[in-house]
Every structure is written in structure tokens, then in C-alpha cells.
Amino acid sequence: MKKLYKIFVIVAAALAASCNVMDLTPKDRVSADVVFSSEEGIRAFLANLYAYAPWQDFNYNCLVERNQCAGTNTVGFYEDHQTDNAIHCQATIIGTGYGYWDARFRHLRDVNYFLDEIPNAGSLTEEQKNILLGEGHFLRGWTYYDIARNYGGAPLIKASQKYTGDPDELCVPRSTEKETWDFVIEELKLAAELLPEVRTGADSRFANKYVALGILSRASLFAASIAKYGYKVKFEGAAADQKLVGIDAEYANDYYQVCIDASKQIIDSGRYSLHGANPANKQEAIDKLMEMFQNPNVAPEECMFICGYAPNGLGHSIELWTPPYQTRENSPHPGFFQPSIDLVDNYECYSRPGEDGYLETREDGDLGYGGFDPDAKYLHFTNAYDIFEDKDARLWSAVVLPFTEWKGKTIRIQNGFILENGTADIGGEATTATKDGVTYYKFGAASAEDYSGFDQTLMANMTRSGFCVKKFLTPGDSGVATQGLGMSTQDWAEIRYAEILLNYAEACVESGLGDQALAEDCLNATRHRAAFTTDIPLTIRNVQRDRRSELAFENKRFDDLIRRREFHELFDHKQIYSFDPILDMRTDPPQFIYVRKVAIREEGLNYTFDSMLYYNSIPGIVTNGLVQNPKW
């Protein structure tokens, strides 16, 4: 019986003229011999493979099966909500593992079929076949990378399987985690050999040689980290005994070398550079960064691999879920994505290069995590945003800071007063205070329409961290929020050159291999683009700090904590704090102080990462006979 492959309706329409697809029965399917008989059919099939590839994009939802083209309703949850980079307005989720095993293997089945059929496509030249085979190997390597980082060792299915009546023949046991990563590397290296260096026109959104090397750089760094830092977590049981999870430490430098070589090829090619690499000042750096994230297509020199979106439900929903309440454009669900003080403190200060940028709030230097202390002497700020003036341009481009301007409005984020008698009126219901005949409002304005934080009567839409997200949002009226889900059309940069530079720097400093001077230059290049004028030394801490700042909200933090086995260390009875701007009525005129305190609805809670979550649960082990991951 011929295999039938379901493809998009738009694909069927595109093929109708040349393949007479609309005359086929059933009319929502196209037989494989028809699809592979023409270049149009092959391109349509390939486009469908890309659509279901493991993009870690705007639709990459941490609460459901991750990005299977399932769409646009992420319920406002993004992967950074599982980390210390951000909190959700309604819940805090730390290190929760969700499976999507079946979807990835369905995708691999189609990729394998594509690889099997391309050599037999008579309508193609040998050059065309090689490029398409490169596409197939790239997609297979990318997909197995996604499986390996979530599950460890996997069944390596390298060709289409045919059912002969015995289901046991289709059961492939798991390979070791090392064997799985080695297969990923093998596939991506082969893809890089077969794919052209440049893709233009209709092919410009498909992978090229350097895209394959970019995923290779990312994947091999992941494998290297697991090998180097695997000692931090002791796994037991059959999966550990059979090495289905974990990689021996002796192989760490082998993987670091793969990362170094792949990254160096991209660097040496001269094809890519940082967008706005040499800003004249901090404001120019902010503007260039915002320009790139609002539309990565303006930065082809940096955005190596872009996922595009279209309106009318074929987009994503970032503008629906994330803007500050004041700029919600009638969205019923704004403000769900709230950057954390943990992340804000990570950004360097220009006056303290090479150091964590913890924001000082008190004269005694105590960071004051216990909330307002009536006996402490607080630093005062005329404008609430003055405390952030010394901070990295990347913070200003990614985060809406209290009382800064966004979309023509002052985004008011305030959580109370210190009254003239020293009494703290923080949180709770909206109140007012009067001084010298002037009325002041607890949340910064008289009406909820004019503020964006802390009001518990509107907490589903208000920031409870003290910050709102800016990265990726459009500066003007987006026109999408009132139209529902799937109406945001900002494109996604899956691979940026900045990541490659930081991968190279990390691999070199972790292993001692590679060109250490070049690695230091790579680290400082991303900082210079952010308007830093001094260099800092190549250290693991400096690389990790800069990586977190540079790649914030790009779905990298979760993977970094997983691969470096840091999650269980960071989230060991961890509490979630907010950074609250509070108006101090004791000064004349009133000025702002800042207080770190346990975030609203987090009182009495703490979060601990269970080591079982370093690997996801494999479904269906009763029928497929696979060995389950530890502790599941």
C-alpha cells in the first residue's frame, strides 16, 4: 500500500497546476510518488519538514508538547518561566519536564523517508540531490539533538522502517547518550559538507553550510558540558548502568574541540558579524539591539537562521501575552512575562566591568532581601529608573524598567509608600498619600489604566516582579492584540552570530583548547556591541554572565542550566523575589527607594529542582520496551 503524507492545504494548492493534485482522492493528501516527481512537490515536502523542526521559538511552550506547529496558544508561558530569568504573572514553574517524544519520532520518520526518496528523484540534477540530502541530514541531526538534550540516549533510526507484520521488528533499543550525540555530530558535519554556503531567493530560509555548523556548535557544547559536569549528579538504575544517560568525563574535550572547530569555521568565513558592532554610545547600542529583535531580517549579518511568521493565525502571540498593562492594546491577557531581579542583577554595570551587577539599594551595601527595614538607610533616586542608568545596554533593550517610556507612555511600576511617619504602606489595596497638597498614588497613578504593576486586584495582568519584557515587542501599535491568538508576526532568529562567539569562548575556556586570545576577543565583542569600552579576561564566570545577558529570553537559559548540571544547585529551596520601587514620603520632594522582597503570591513557597528533570520521561515503555530514564 502506498504511503500517504499529509501536507498543508497551501501545499496542495501550490501543486495543483503541475501535478493535478486537486483531482486526487483523498483531496487532503498527496501520494509519495506524486510529491517526489517534481521539484515543486519536493520543495513542498521539505517546507513541511522545516515547519515541524525543533525551533525553540515564540511558540515553544513549556507547558505542552514543545513546538510541534501546535501553535500559538502558549497560555503566556515561555521557557524562561522555568528558570531564574522570569516569572509568570499567575504561577511560578521551575524545571518542569514535559515530553514530546512521539512528535519528534514522527518527524524523523518523514525525514528518513525524504532521505530515502531523494536519490530516486529523476527530476533533479546530482547537485540538487546533494543539496537536498544535506537538508535531510541537517534536519535529522537537528531533531536528534533536540531528542538527546531532553532524553539522553535514543533509538537511532537511520532509514525508513517498513512494517512486515511483526511489530517487534520496528522496536529499536536506545543507544547510549554518547552514541546519540556522536550521531548528531556526524549528521550535522555531513550536512555542512553538502549544503551550499549561500542560500538566496526562495531558498533563503533553508539551512546553509554555516547554519548546520551553528547547530553543530550548539549541540557539541551541550554534549561537552554533560561530560564535564556529569559528576555533579549521581544517576542510578538501568538507564545509568547502560549509559543511556550521561557521558564519561574523558570525552569532554573531544566535544569541546568539535564546538571549537565548528564555531571557528563560521568565524573564519567572514560571512557574519554583530549587528551594530561598534556603537558610538549606549543609546545607539540600545537602538540597534531593539531594531534587530523587532525584525531580525534587518540584521542578516548576525541573524544566521530565521523562522518567519504570517498573520491570520499563522503567527505567534508574543504581543498578546507579554506587553505592559498600559500598552496592552485591549489584549485581555497582557503582562504574563515578567523579567526577574535575578536576571537584572546579572547585567554588568559600566562602572564595574567584569562583575555581577547587583543593584545597591542601601547605604550599608546589604541587598536587603528581607523586604523594607525601617532601621536601614536607603539610597534615594529622583527618578525610579536612575538606579539602572549604569546598566548594560542589553538590559535597556530587553526589559521595560520602572517609569521608563514605552510606546509613548510612562510605564508606572510602583508598590507603595513610606509615609512621613516612617510607616510602610506596601502592597495590598490602592491607597493615596498627600504631602504639601500633592496627592500621590500607591501604584503610581489614580487609575489602573495608567499603571502596570503590583495591583493585586489585577494581578493576572500586572507585573509582580517589578519589570516587564520589551525584547521582541514592536514599538508602535502592533494591531494584533485585539485580533486574538496567532496574530504576532515578528520573525525569530534561531541562531545568532553572538551565540557562536560565546560558544567558542566557552568551549575554549572550559577545555584550554583553541585560540585563547581569540576566545577572549569573542567574549568582549558582544560586550563592545553593548557599548562597553573595556575588555574583561576570559573566565568561565565572565562567559556565563555575558551569555545570560546576551541571550536572555531566547530559550537558552534552561538548556544552559541543564547541560552544566547547575539547575539543582540553583534551585535548592529557592525563593522568588521582586524588586519594588517605593515612594519615600520622608524626603522633600518624595523620592524612590528599592526593596527586594518575596514576590506577591510566593510567600512561604520555595522551589527545588529534582534531578530526575535533567532527563524527560520516555512514554510507552510498556509497549515499546525501552528503558526508562532515572527516577521516572
Image (cartoon, grey):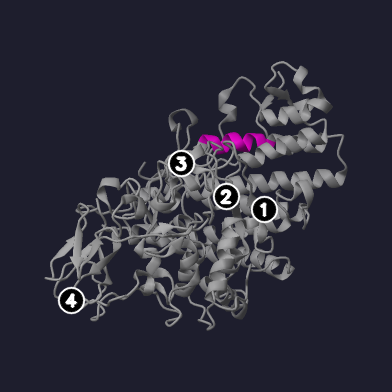
- Which amino acid type is marked by label 3? Thr
The CA span between labels 1 and 2 is 10 Å
Mark 1 falls on what kind of element? Answer: helix
User: Looking at the image, is 396 positioned above or below residue 196?
Assistant: below
Real-space CA distance between mark 4 and mark 1, rounded to the nearest whole angstrom: 57 Å
Crowdedness of circle 4 by 10 Å Cα count: few (<14), some, many (20+)?
few
Return the disc, 4 or 1, that comes first in the chain's sequence: 1
Query: Under tag 2, what secondary structure?
Result: helix
Q: Nearer the viewer, mark 4 or mark 3?
A: 4
Query: Marks 2/3: CA distance?
Result: 23 Å
Q: Is residue 244 at all visible to an observer of this figure?
A: no
Dot 2 corresponds to which residue? Answer: 145
Looking at numbered disc 4 in the image, what kind of residue is underneath it?
Ala
- Membership of 106 in magenta stretch: yes
Mark 4 or mark 3, earlier in chain: 3
Mark 2 vs mark 3: which is more N-terminal?
Answer: 3
Magenta-colored span? 102-112
Q: Position of residue 26 (x, y in %)?
A: 69, 17
Q: Could you tell me if the residues under marks 1 and 2 are in contact, i.e. CB atoms within 8 Å?
A: yes
Name the residue that disc number 3 marks: 74
Give the x, y percent position of residue 179: 57, 50
SS for dot 3:
loop
Query: Which of the two marks, 4 or 1, is nearer to us in this view?
Result: 4
Among numbered discs 2 and 4, the one appearing first in the sequence: 2
| Image position, residue 227 (x, y; %) | 49, 60
Q: Which residue is denoted by mark 1 in the rendering?
A: 188
| Image quadrant occupied by the C terminus | top left
Q: Amino acid at mark 2?
A: Tyr
Q: Which mark is residue 376?
A: 4
Estimate the spatial distance between the alpha carbons at disc 3 and disc 1, rounded to whole Å: 30 Å
